[in-house]
Amino acid sequence: MPTLTPQTRRLKVEEAAWLNVANYYNSYRTNVLDRQLARTPSSAIVKGKQRAKLQEVEDWADPRESELPEVFRGVAGVGLARSIVSGADLGGEGEEGRKSPLSVRLEGLEFKVLFLIYSY
């Protein structure tokens, strides 16, 4: 049987020591996680990570026009965005024979694009 040199023995001892450290760390981490799970009821919600209540979502989802910059106020700004998101008459004529704001703004778009393309 070959004899181990002092360096090889030292490497084996060091490897065993690192294995002990890794095992200790893994067991410590498992114990800490188990204790945290035992302390925290499953229904508890971490502060700051709570789900928004329905009323809060509705308040955030529909900004008041007075809270918006002047650029986004009126029919051409947030009003247009609301009509698009609500799905009200996305193309052509609306309920009472009037065109949707999006249709009004897009009427001359094709002409403008073609003009820009062929003018250069």
Image: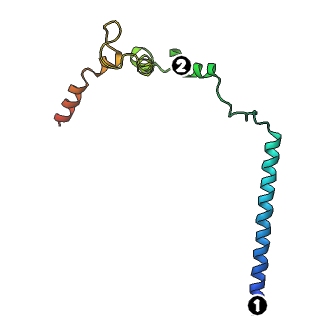
Residue 12 position, x and y percent, is: 76, 80
Q: In the figure, 37 relative to 71: above or below?
A: below
Q: Position of residue 40 (x, y in %)?
A: 80, 39
The amino acid type of the residue labelled 2 equals Pro
The residue depicted at 23 percent of the width and 27 percent of the height is 110
The image position of residue 79, as x and y in percent, is: 43, 16
**Element assignment for label 2:** loop
Local packing at callout 2 (Cα closer than 10 Å; few below 14, some 14-19, many 20+) is few
In this view of the protein, which residue sits in the foreground, 112 or 53?
Answer: 53
In this rendered view, identify the residue nearer to me: 1 or 101: 1
Q: Position of residue 80 (x, y in %)?
A: 40, 18
Above/below status of 102 relative to 38:
above
Rendered view: 23 above or below 4: above
Judge from the rendering whether residue 84 lies leftward or rightward of residue 2; answer left or right: left
User: In the image, which is nearer the foreground, mark 2 or mark 1?
Assistant: 1
**Residue at the spot x=45%, y=17% of the render?**
73
Residue projecting furthest to the front: 1
Image quarter (top left, top right, bottom left or bottom right) of the N terminus: bottom right
Reading the image, the residue beneath label 1 is 5
Disc 1 on helix, strand or loop?
Answer: loop
Q: Which mark is residue 63?
A: 2
